[in-house]
């Protein structure tokens, strides 16, 4: 039965009682009320149409609940991975385009395969590469990036994406004077409703209430008020000229993106051939792609400036034949009455221009369930996306397991990290066959499930079935949902992730670790939208610091402190125990990385105490010894004996002693050179060598 549970973890749910079924039903419905609006908001964060958030809330949710190890973990779209998915793909396709959607699904498959492999090979411990300060620094920066990226939707201005997030954010801030006040009013109203309900009626689904109320109000007042017009209907030469320049740069950006993608694909194909000529041509293509990327970056910046310029041009409509004609505000022909509206540029597609005198809404959402389709694999881009996929796999796993363990502290449930990896991996793999982008465990929805009394993973399946009902019957009713409301939902979710206290606490514990967290924070901000590079830098610095520390572990000559214990001579300003017996504490393993430092410390002790006859290595902190370490210890022992100094060891662990015994080092030094404890070693060595030299005894052993 245990083996069957290992393959089919959901069997642990059975037998179910009436009470557990009722609890799961209630929890599933409650979570669904949060899941539907959240999934649509996070899909937009990922650069996808909102319906893909609903797709990601269907099959992946069911698969993760069936094969995961936590009964309260809810899997689906999450803010962090949504942003990381968008950031990873923006260099290769325009957000929302068919190519972008295809790559998002492929990236989900890649992340799923990586997580599944980590789970099957029980490599969950690899997440330990992410130290706590690095995680906190990255999470804080990512939360700021995610939240502030929604600012443009809150105030109703464009947020043209370029390769420099901070520049994009500055461009948004410069447009505050162009705020669309009705859009801001909807955002403030939604925020007030969510917060108000949370205070007055905590059990109420505030997010869903905000969605329903604002959608109904938006539909009632015709909030969108959009028009698709031909360029010929715009009677403003400067607007038309700017439109043409905008269309030209947009087309050029798309063309450059295709050329970069094709160059990278061909380079990857040539590299797989393995011969020297192919590698040379592949290098040329990579260099060509880099030049094209630089050119595209310049065109993106120009395109962004034109988009902002167009949005700032206010037009007024005049009834004509055919349809409305549009003039710059305040420049109507004499005697002609306008419609009094402020028409703004909203987008362009071919020869048609979208103008809006209202606010942005979700728009059409396809009705129906996602069809089964094998994900399209772009082998040329797979290698380029692999670093982002690895980071997303680790971040998502860390997020899911931390949530599961936090909930398990209250439920007493045992969490298996490897099984959770398998469940998350299968969820992403299965989801990619049904139009889903990358998913992971959600803290907010899992917390709602735990609070609602979920007993088994059945609650997640119930929430997924609620999404099915929305996809089948209710998508048409969400057309008028204001984009600013979804932006508020994202902001409220991610700003709660920002934590300063852990970095302050880390500063008190270890300033180096805290500095690494701070560096990760600023690096992530500076490298946005490619935020995966920020955490990769944090990991690299952490490993470098760890390597440096392992190369120079704590090692010092010790002496007696006033309380009789041993402490460092320099750290505590102590008098030496003896001139002939020098105890040296070494708190690192004797391996290739630090054995040279061990030799330096021993030789330093010999130089500081020229009358020394014995050097005692207090080795209770030595956990292992490798071939390099064994060889160096043998060599140092010979050097010391050649000048009349003996080397001794105390407190060595079994695994270290056994290596020395197998290699003959134990016999070469002599059994009398090894002591079980430092006190026994000091007592015997001081008695032997101090007595020979006529030196005073160790103060700790002197007669009272």
Image (cartoon, rainbow, N blue to C red):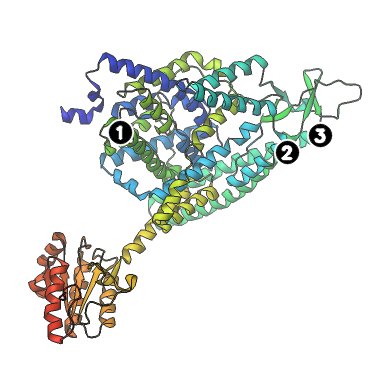
Q: Earlier in the sequence, mark 3 or mark 2?
A: 3
Residue drawn where x is 50% and y is 25% of the image: 199
Please say if the residues under marks 1 and 2 sit with CB atoms less than 8 Å apart. no
Residue drawn where x is 20% and y is 71% of the image: 617
Q: CA distance from mark 1 to mark 2?
A: 53 Å
Q: Quadrant of residue 63?
A: top left
Q: Which residue is mark 3?
A: 237
Give 60 or 143, whichever is nearer the viewer. 143
- Say if 237 sits above or below 478 in the image: below
Residue drawn where x is 30% and y is 26% of the image: 66
Give 616 or 219, whichever is nearer the viewer. 616
Viewer-nearest of discs 1 and 3: 1
Q: Which residue is mark 2?
A: 309
How many circles with numbers are drawn on the protein?
3
Question: Position of 509 compared to 482: left or right?
Answer: left
Q: CA distance from mark 1 to mark 3?
A: 65 Å
């Amino acid at each position: 039965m245990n083996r069957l549970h290992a393959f089919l973890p959901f069997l642990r749910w059975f037998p179910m009682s009436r009470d557990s079924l009722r609890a799961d039903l209630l929890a599933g419905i409650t979570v669904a009320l949060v899941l539907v609006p959240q999934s649509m908001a996070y899909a937009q964060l990922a650069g996808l149409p909102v319906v893909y958030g609903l797709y990601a809330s269907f099959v992946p949710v069911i698969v993760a609940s069936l094969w995961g190890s936590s009964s309260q973990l809810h899997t689906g779209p999450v803010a962090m991975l949504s942003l990381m998915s968008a950031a990873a793909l923006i260099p290769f396709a325009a957000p929302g385009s068919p190519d972008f959607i295809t790559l998002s699904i492929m990236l989900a498959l890649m992340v799923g395969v990586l997580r599944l492999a980590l789970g099957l090979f029980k490599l969950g411990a690899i997440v330990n590469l992410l130290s706590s300060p690095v995680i906190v620094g990255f999470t804080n920066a990512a939360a700021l990036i995610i939240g502030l990226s929604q600012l443009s939707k809150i105030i109703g201005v464009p947020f043209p994406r370029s390769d420099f997030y901070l520049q994009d954010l500055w461009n948004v801030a410069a447009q505050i004077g162009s705020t669309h006040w009705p859009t801001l009013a909807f955002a403030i109203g939604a925020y007030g409703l969510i917060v108000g309900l949370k205070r007055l009626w905590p059990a109420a689904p505030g997010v869903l209430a905000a969605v329903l109320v604002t959608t109904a109000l938006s539909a009632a007042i015709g909030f969108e008020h959009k028009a698709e017009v031909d360029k010929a209907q715009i009677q403003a030469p400067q607007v038309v000229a700017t439109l043409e320049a905008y269309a030209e740069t947009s087309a050029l950006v798309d063309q450059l993106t295709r050329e970069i993608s094709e160059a990278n694909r061909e380079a990857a194909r040539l590299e797989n051939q393995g011969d020297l000529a192919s590698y040379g041509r592949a290098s040329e293509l990579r260099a060509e792609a880099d030049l094209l990327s630089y050119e595209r970056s310049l065109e993106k910046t120009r395109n962004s400036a034109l988009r902002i310029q167009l949005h700032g041009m206010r037009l007024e409509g005049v009834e004509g034949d055919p349809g409305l004609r549009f003039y710059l505000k305040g420049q109507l022909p004499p005697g002609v009455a306008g419609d009094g509206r402020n028409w703004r540029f909203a987008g362009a597609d071919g020869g048609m221009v979208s103008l809006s005198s209202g606010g942005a809404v979700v728009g059409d959402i396809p009705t129906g369930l996602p069809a089964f389709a094998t994900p399209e694999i772009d082998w040329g881009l797979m290698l380029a996306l692999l670093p982002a996929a690895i980071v997303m796999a680790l971040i998502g796993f860390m997020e899911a397991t931390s949530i599961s363990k936090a909930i398990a502290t209250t439920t007493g449930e045992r969490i298996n990290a490897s099984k959770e990896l398998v469940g998350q991996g299968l969820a992403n793999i299965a989801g990619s066959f049904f139009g889903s982008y990358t998913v992971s465990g959600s803290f907010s929805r899992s917390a709602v499930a735990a609070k609602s009394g979920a007993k088994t993973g059945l609650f997640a399946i119930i929430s997924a079935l609620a999404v099915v009902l929305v996809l089948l019957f209710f998508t048409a009713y969400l057309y008028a949902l204001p984009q600013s409301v979804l932006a508020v939902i994202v902001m409220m979710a991610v700003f709660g992730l920002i934590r300063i206290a852990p970095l302050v606490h880390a500063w008190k514990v270890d300033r180096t670790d805290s500095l690494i967290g701070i560096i990760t924070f600023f690096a992530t901000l500076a490298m946005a939208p490619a935020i995966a590079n920020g955490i990769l830098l944090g990991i690299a610095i952490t490993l470098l610091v760890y390597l440096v520390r392992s190369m120079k572990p704590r090692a010092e000559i010790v002496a007696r402190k006033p309380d009789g214990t041993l402490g460092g001579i320099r750290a505590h300003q102590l008098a030496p125990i003896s001139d002939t017996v020098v105890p040296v504490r070494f708190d690192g393993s004797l391996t290739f990385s630090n054995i040279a430092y061990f030799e330096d410390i021993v030789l330093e002790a010999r130089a500081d105490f020229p009358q020394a006859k014995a050097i005692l290595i207090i080795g209770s902190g030595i956990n292992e010894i490798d071939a390099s370490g064994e060889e160096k210890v043998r060599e140092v022992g010979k050097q010391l004996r050649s000048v009349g100094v003996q080397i001794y060891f105390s407190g060595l662990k079994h695994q270290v002693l056994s290596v020395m015994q197998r290699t003959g080092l134990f016999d070469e030094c002599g059994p009398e050179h090894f002591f079980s404890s430092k006190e026994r070693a000091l007592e015997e060595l001081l008695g032997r060598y101090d007595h020979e030299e006529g030196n005073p005894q160790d103060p700790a052993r002197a007669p009272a």
